[in-house]
Image (spheres, rainbow, N blue to C red):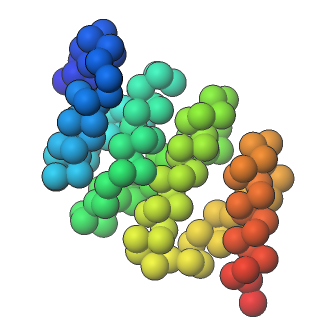
Amino acid sequence: MIITELLDIIKINDDGTLLNNLYDEFRDGRNPNDILILLNSDDGMIGFGCDISCEIKIKDAGVQRTIMDRLEEILAHNKDSYNRQRAFDALYGFYMDNDDTKGLLLLCEKLINDDIDEIKSFALEFIDKNKR
């Protein structure tokens, strides 16, 4: 259903209001498993799943871990640089929401040679500021 909703929004091609309204549903507690549907779909929909993940907090630790695991897979293996960047942004948010600097530090250590300059630069800077 979530993919059909997004396709309908894209087809309408409004000013972004409908898309923001959909994101608001997730901010207001819409089932986060719908995010997993997006993250497990094709590249075009993965981007929306990553974007929504950047916008919300997930209270259920198990669901959050599942989403984070999928975001890490996207970051490690997806060819689309936008999806990878947004996956990284979402992971950063989840780690910070959980006050898990050590977890983010471990992730950054994997990314010091990343081919996306923004990710690589952030990783190196984060490691420099937090490794002691």
Say if 63 sits above or below 11 in the image.
Answer: below
Q: Residue furthest top?
A: 11
Question: Which picture quadrant has residue 6?
Answer: top left
Say if 116 sits above or below 92 in the image.
Answer: above
- Horizontal side of 8 relative to 68 (left or right) equals left
Say if 93 sits above or below 13 in the image.
Answer: below
Say if 14 sits above or below 132 in the image.
Answer: above
The x and y percentages for residue 66 are 38, 53
- Horizontal side of 55 relative to 131 (left or right) equals left
Quarter of the figure with the N terminus: top left
Q: Residue furthest bottom?
A: 132
Residue 72 shows in the view: no
Quarter of the figure with the C terminus: bottom right
Residue in the image at 22% along x and 44% along y: 24
Q: Residue furthest right?
A: 113
- Horizontal side of 106 relative to 88 (left or right) equals right
The x and y percentages for residue 25 are 18, 43
Residue in the image at 66% along x and 69% along y: 106
Q: Nearer the viewer, residue 65 or 128?
A: 128
Residue 111 shows in the view: yes
Question: Which picture quadrant has residue 79?
Answer: top right
Residue in the image at 57% along x and 72% along y: 103
Residue in the image at 27% along x and 36% along y: 20
The x and y percentages for residue 102 are 59, 78
Question: Which picture quadrant has residue 64?
Answer: bottom left
The x and y percentages for residue 57 are 31, 60
Q: Nearer the viewer, residue 94 or 121?
A: 121
